[in-house]
Image (tube, helix red, strand yellow):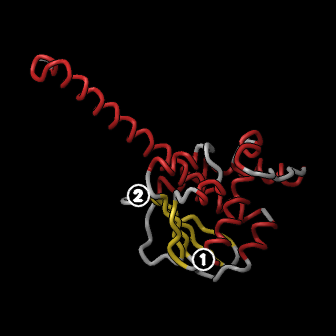
C-alpha cells in the first residue's frame, strides 16, 4: 500500500518533503561533524609547525579548553592549550570549557564550514554566540584564522578573507605538512574514541 493511497496526493508530497528534509539535516550534520573534526585536528597540527600560531598561543592560559559546536545539541569539538601547543580532544563537548563558540543552528555552521560565509560576515549577522571571556574569544578567532590558512584551498581563502594571507614558500611547506598529517590524525582520534 502506498503513502499516496492512504493520505492522498497532498499527503504523499508532504511525506516526501519531510523525508528530504530529514535527509538534508543528516547531510548537514555529516558536513559539520567532519568539518569540526578537521578543524580540531588541523588546530593541533598547525600549532606544531606554525610560528605565527605559536606566538598567538603564548597569550593563552595554559590548560584553556576551547569548544566549538552547534546549538542546541551538537556536534561539538574540543581542543586544549598545553604549554603553547594545542591538543585535539575529539568530537565532544566539555561543559566547563573556558571558551565556547556555538553556532546558533546547523544551517549557520554549514554556511561557515563550506566557505559560503566568512567569519567577519558570520559575526555581523550574529550566526554564533561566544560563551566565556570576550578577549579569549578574540584570541580564538585570530587562531582559527591562522588555522584556516593552512586548511582551506587558496581559491577559498580569497573568498573567505577580505585580505587573503600571502602564502610564502615556508607557509606552503607547513600547509603540505598539515595536509599530509590531517588524515592520519583523524583516523587516530576515530580509533581512540571507539
**Which residue sits furthest right?**
169
Q: Which of marks 2 and 1 is nearer the N terminus?
A: 2
- Taking the spot 65% from the left edge, 61% from the top edge, the residue there is 43
Q: Quadrant of the N terminus?
A: top left
Q: Is 9 above or below relative to 62?
A: above
Mark 2 → mark 1, Cα distance in angstroms:
22 Å
Image location of residue 78, percent across then percent down = 52, 66
Characterize the local packing of mark 2: few (<14), some (14-19) or many (20 or more) Cα atoms within 10 angstroms. some
Residue under label 1? 134
CB contact under 8 Å: marks 2 and 1: no
Q: Is 169 above or below relative to 63?
A: above
The dot on residue 43 is none
Task: Please name whichever residue, 57 or 118, is drawn nearer the observer in this view of the structure.
Answer: 118
**Which residue sits furthest bottom?**
61
Question: From the viewer's perspective, is 57 left or right of 4?
Answer: right
- Taking the spot 66% from the left edge, 65% from the top edge, the residue there is 141
Q: Nearer the viewer, mark 2 or mark 1?
A: 1
Question: From the viewer's perspective, is 172 left or right of 58?
Answer: right
Task: Please name whichever residue, 64 or 117, is drawn nearer the observer in this view of the structure.
Answer: 117
- Taking the spot 45% from the left edge, 58% from the top edge, the residue there is 104
Residue under label 2? 74
Element on which disc 2 rests = loop
**Which residue sits furthest front?**
124
Q: In which quarter of the image is the C terminus?
A: bottom left
Question: From the viewer's perspective, is 103 left or right of 60?
Answer: left
Image location of residue 132, percent across then percent down = 53, 77
Amino acid at each position: 500500500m502506498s503513502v499516496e493511497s492512504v493520505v492522498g496526493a497532498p499527503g504523499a508530497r508532504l511525506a516526501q518533503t519531510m523525508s528530504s528534509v530529514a535527509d538534508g539535516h543528516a547531510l548537514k550534520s555529516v558536513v559539520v561533524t567532519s568539518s569540526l573534526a578537521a578543524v580540531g585536528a588541523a588546530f593541533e597540527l598547525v600549532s606544531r609547525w606554525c610560528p605565527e600560531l605559536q606566538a598567538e598561543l603564548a597569550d593563552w592560559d595554559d590548560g584553556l579548553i576551547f569548544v566549538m559546536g552547534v546549538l542546541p545539541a551538537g556536534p561539538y569539538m574540543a581542543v586544549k592549550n598545553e604549554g603553547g601547543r594545542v591538543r585535539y580532544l575529539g568530537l565532544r563537548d566539555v561543559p566547563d570549557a573556558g571558551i565556547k563558540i556555538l553556532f546558533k543552528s546547523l544551517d549557520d555552521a554549514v554556511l561557515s564550514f563550506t566557505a559560503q560565509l566568512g567569519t567577519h560576515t558570520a559575526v555581523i549577522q550574529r550566526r554564533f554566540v561566544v560563551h566565556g571571556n570576550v578577549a579569549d574569544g578574540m584570541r580564538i578567532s585570530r587562531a582559527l584564522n591562522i588555522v584556516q590558512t593552512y586548511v582551506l584551498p587558496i581559491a577559498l581563502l580569497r573568498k573567505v578573507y577580505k585580505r587573503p594571507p600571502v602564502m610564502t614558500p615556508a607557509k606552503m611547506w607547513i600547509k603540505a605538512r598539515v595536509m599530509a598529517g590531517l588524515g592520519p590524525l583523524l583516523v587516530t582520534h576515530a580509533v581512540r574514541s571507539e
